[in-house]
Amino acid sequence: MTPEPAALRGRDPELELLGERLRNTRDYLGMSQQHVSDMTGIPRSAVSDIERGSRRVDSLELKKLARLYMRPVSYFLAKEEEADLGEHALAGLPRALVGLTDGDWEEVLSFAEFLKFRRAGEQEQERGE
Amino acid sequence: MTPEPAALRGRDPELELLGERLRNTRDYLGMSQQHVSDMTGIPRSAVSDIERGSRRVDSLELKKLARLYMRPVSYFLAKEEEADLGEHALAGLPRALVGLTDGDWEEVLSFAEFLKFRRAGEQEQERGE
DNA sequence: CCCGTCTGTCTGATTTTCCAGCATCGCTGC
DNA sequence: GCAGCGATGCTGGAAAATCAGACAGACGGG
C-alpha cells in the first residue's frame, strides 16, 4: 500500500545504536562489509542493513560478529545510560568470574579500571562520527 | 510444497542450546512463558518456539530476556558452560571491581566470559560452517 | 467431573530477509 | 578528463520467517 522506499525503515533507536556500534568497530578494524560477510556467513547486504539499523541482528549472528571483532557481546548491547539495573547483575556474577586464569583475571581487573576511567571522562566523547 | 510442520525445524544445535538455557533459567525463576511475554513484548508462542530451538532470538530480544532473568547476555551465548562454582574468587572483591555502575558490571562479567571461552577454542570461527 | 493454567503446535496473513543488480562515491593511474 | 575498481547504499520482487489467534493435551485441585 504505502510505497515507502524501505530506506526510511530506520525507526528503532536501539537497533540504530547497535548498528552504529557494529559499523564503528568494523571501521576501526579496517574490515570491509564483504570480508565480514565472508567470515560470518551473513549476507553482505544484510551487514549493510544492520549497520544502518534497518535489519535486526540475530543473537548468534551478533555472537559471530563479536568474535570477529574481538569484543564481548555486551560491548554492542550495553545500555549507555539506563538506570534500571539494580543488584541483579550480582545474581549471575560468581559464575562469570570463577575459573579464570591468573592472566585473564588481571585482564578483567584492568578492564574494570578502564571502564571506570572511561566513565570519568565520558563528557568528552560525543563527537564520534 | 513440503508441508513441513515447522515444528521439525530444530536443526541448529547452537539455537537449541540457547533455547535450553533460556528455558532452564525461566524455570529456575518460576516464570511462565506468558509472564515473560508480558514483560518483554515477545509473543508467547515465540517464547515457546525459542525455548525449543525452532525460532531465532533477536539480539535486542535476548537483551530483554537477559535483563528479566537477571543474567548477563553472555550467560546465554557462552560457548560451553562452566560448571565451576568455587567461591574463592568472591571472597574479597578487588578494589578494581567496586564502584562500578551496573552497566559496567555487565561489561566486566561479559568480558570475563569472553576471556574464558576465547581460551576455550577458536576453531569455531573459521570456515563458513 | 469441571476449571484454570501452562505449553506445544497449526493456519492463514503479515512482515522480514535474501538475492541480484544497479547507481554512486572515492581513489588510482593513464 | 575518464576508465577501472573496490566499497557501500539501495531497490524489486521472490522466498522465508514470524505473528495473531486459535485449539488441544497435560496437569493439578476443588
Image (cartoon, coloured by chain):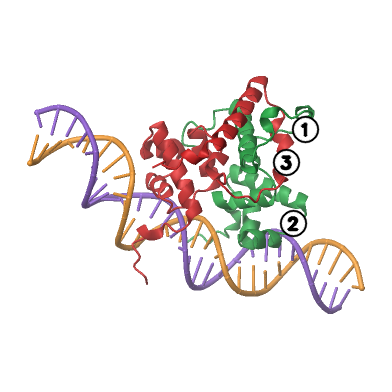
Chain colours: A red, B green, C purple, D orange
Q: Which mark is residue A90?
A: 3
Please tell me which of labels 2 and 1 falls first in the chain.
2
Mark toward the viewer: 3 or 1: 3
Q: Position of residue B96 (x, y in %)?
A: 66, 29
Q: Which amino acid does label 1 sit on?
A: Leu
Callout 3: SS: helix
Q: Position of residue B43 (x, y in %)?
A: 61, 62
> Would you place residue B46 above or below residue A122 in this image?
below
| Amino acid type for the residue under numbered disc 2 | Met
Given residues A82 and B33, the one toward you in this image is A82
Residue identified by numbered label 2: B31
Same chain for marks 2 and 3?
Answer: no
Label 1: chain? B
Residue that numbered label 1 is attached to? B85
Q: Residue A11 vs residue A101: left or right?
A: left
Judge from the rendering whether residue A118 lies leftward or rightward of residue B52; answer left or right: left
Q: How far apart are marks 3 and 1 (CA)?
A: 14 Å
Q: What is the CA distance from the residue labelled 2 to the residue labelled 3?
A: 20 Å
In the rendered structure, the residue with mark 3 lies on which chain? A
Instruction: Answer few, some or many: residues within 10 Å of disc 1's Cα (few below 14, many 20 plus, some between 14 and 19).
Output: few
Name the element at disc 2. Answer: loop
